Image: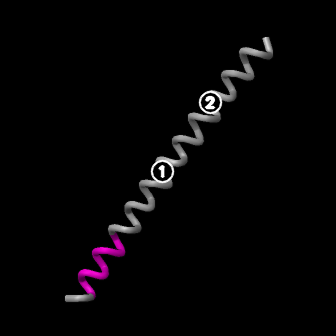
Amino acid sequence: MKKIVLAALTALTLLSACNTVSGFGKDVSKAGDKLEQSADRHAH
């Protein structure tokens, strides 16, 4: 029983960590897009 609970908690932790990393990647991507747009506006 303890092994099942431990396995479930481990899986939950790993899945939530993947979701967090994915969200962080999207935020960094959006920031890069904004920086690129700003550079394009100031270059022309």
Which of the labelled discs sits on residue 39, or is there none?
none
Secondary structure beneath label 1: helix
Q: Of the residues shown, which amino acid type is indicated by label 1?
A: Ser
How far from the left and from the top, in percent, is residue 40? 73, 19
Residue at 34% x, 71% y is 11
Q: Classify residue 34 as left or right of residue 13.
A: right
Above-or-below relation of 23 to 40: below
Q: Position of residue 19 (x, y in %)?
A: 42, 54
Q: Amino acid at mark 2?
A: Asp
Quarter-of-image position of residue 7: bottom left
Image quadrant in which you'd find residue 6: bottom left
Instruction: Tell me: residue 16, above or below residue 30.
Output: below
Inter-mark Cα distance, 1 to 2 = 17 Å
User: What x and y, as percent, mark residue 1?
Assistant: 19, 88
Give the residue at x 48% y 50%.
22
**Residue marked by disc 2:** 33
Tell me the magenta residue range: 3-11
For this view, does 11 lie left or right of residue 33?
Answer: left
